[in-house]
Structure formats: structure tokens, C-alpha cells
Image (cartoon, rainbow, N blue to C red):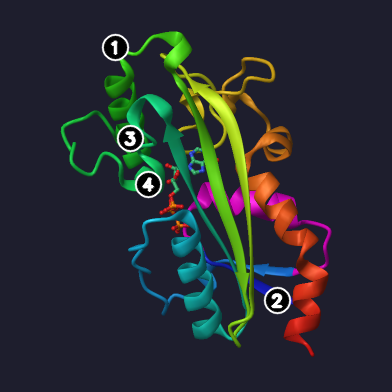
Amino acid sequence: TTIVLATRNKGKIAELEHLLAGYGLTVLGLDAFPEIGEIEEDGVTFEENSLKKARTVAELTGHIAVADDSGLEVDALGGAPGVYSARYSDDRPDLPGPSIDDRNNQKLLEALAPVQEAERTGRFRCVMSACAPDGAHIVAEGAWEGRIARDFKGGNGFGYDPLFIDPADGRHSAELPKDEKNRRSHRGKALRALLAQWPDFWRRVNG
Ligand code: ITT
């Protein structure tokens, strides 16, 4: 079986390839389909955006597509940046880069500067979906509760990982090796929940 990962985020691809190893699936990235352009994420929920990405890529490639829509919800910010996590600092080109992830983290640190330790709670969320070319689909979610640090630690992962404290041992997410992050993360949980539905999905897709 060939599945296409409906994402261009290199960090997600690395984690998902690690999680999917050993299932006997041929996993392609969107790089294999250069004709597929940007998919506009106009949904207001992770689920809407996840399903839109999976459905679009399944229709365009003729393969089962797996999509991840994810983000960081911070309680002291009323759940922001949430579904806007990837582009949180689009309004702050003045912040130090070079990457958008760097500016996102700087904006988050700034927003939380006045917030005391006990209130710096939040969670990563991930909604993972799989969609077949005929429109059949499954959806699963995962969350990872944690706290937002005041300093950067670790060189692994991507996005907000250097600022996200894993409550299990106080390490930052970017300090965790890939297999350890996958065991605890929103993405690992969502993908395992999706795979639990796979046999049933497979029967529906293949009659
Ligand atoms: P695709 O739509 O191509 O998959 P994207 O990066 O635009 O890539 P999202 O819209 O789902 O994907 O945004 C997810 C953002 O949430 C991501 O760019 C990070 O800023 C953040 N994020 C999600 N999961 C994360 C993780 O495991 N570690 C750190 N940050 C994460």
C-alpha cells in the first residue's frame, strides 16, 4: 500500500516516517508530487484543516493520504496560537529569525513575559486523518499537556519544541530523541489512534 503524507513540514515528515516504519507501507511525501500547490488552510478547527489536506491530496494523487493538522494552545492566551500556530508571527517580521519558527517562539516568549510560572500551561494538539480517493476517511486526535518555558533548550524537533516543557521529567520537547518524543507527543498519540482504525478503514476502501 502506498500512502502520501499530505504535509510539507519537514519536522512532521521525519516524525511520521519514524512512527510508520515497519508497517510495510510505502510512504511518499508531497515532494513526489511537485504539481500539487499550496493547500489553503481556511478551517477554524484542526479537524477541518486536517481533513481538507487529506481529501485534497487523495483526490489529486489517487492514493490514500494522511494529513496532520496541529498546533500549540496556550491557556494564558485564550488558546492562541492554536490553528494559527504555523503562522503566529506573520504580523511580526521585525522579530529575530532567520526562520518563521524562530519568530513564532520569540512572539510567544514576549506574549508570556508577564505570566507567572503556574499560569504558563498549554498543550500541543494534533488531528490526524486518512482519506481514500473515493472520500472514505478516518480521523483521530492526540494532545500533550505541558508548560511554556522562559528559555530555549534542545536542538531536536521543530516549531515550539525548544520552549515546550514535558511535565514527565521537565525536559524541553526539543531535548527528547525522536522515539521518546513520539511516545509522548500529540502526534504519536494521534497516529496510534488512527492506526487502530486502519483495519476497518481498509475494509471499507477495498470492499
Ligand atoms: P502542513 O500544513 O504542510 O502540514 P504546517 O507547518 O503549516 O505544515 P500546521 O498548519 O498543522 O502545519 O501547523 C502546525 C504548527 O504547529 C507547526 O508549524 C508548529 O509551529 C506547531 N507544531 C505542531 N506540532 C508541533 C510539534 O510537535 N513541535 C513543535 N511545534 C509543533
Confirm whether residue 49 shows in the render: yes
Decide whether residue 8 is among the magenta residues: yes
In front of the other: 106 or 198? 198
How far separated are the C-alphas under marks 1 and 3?
17 Å
Distance in Å between CA atoms under marks 4 and 2? 28 Å
Q: Earlier in the sequence, mark 1 or mark 3?
A: 3
First in residue order: circle 2 vs circle 3? 2
Label 4 within 8 A of ligand 1 by Cβ: yes
Residue 204 position within the rendered picture, expressed as x and y whole percent measured from the top left: 75, 83
Q: Secondary structure at mark 3?
A: helix
Q: Label for residue 114? A: 1
Q: Disc 4 residue type?
A: Ala
Front disc: 1 or 4: 1
Query: In the image, which is nearer the foreground, mark 4 or mark 2?
Result: 4
Give the amino acid type for the residue marked by disc 2 in the picture: Thr
Crowding near the residue tagged with mark 1, few <14, some 14–19, many ≥20 C-alpha atoms within 10 Å: few
Relative height, residue 175 to residue 169 (above, below): below
- Number of labelled discs? 4
Q: CA distance from mark 4 to mark 3?
A: 8 Å
Q: Which mark is residue 104?
A: 3
Q: Residues within 10 Å of mark 4 (few under 14, many from 20)?
A: some
Q: First in sequence, mark 1 or 2: give its number.
A: 2
Mark 3 CB within 8 Å of ligand 1: yes
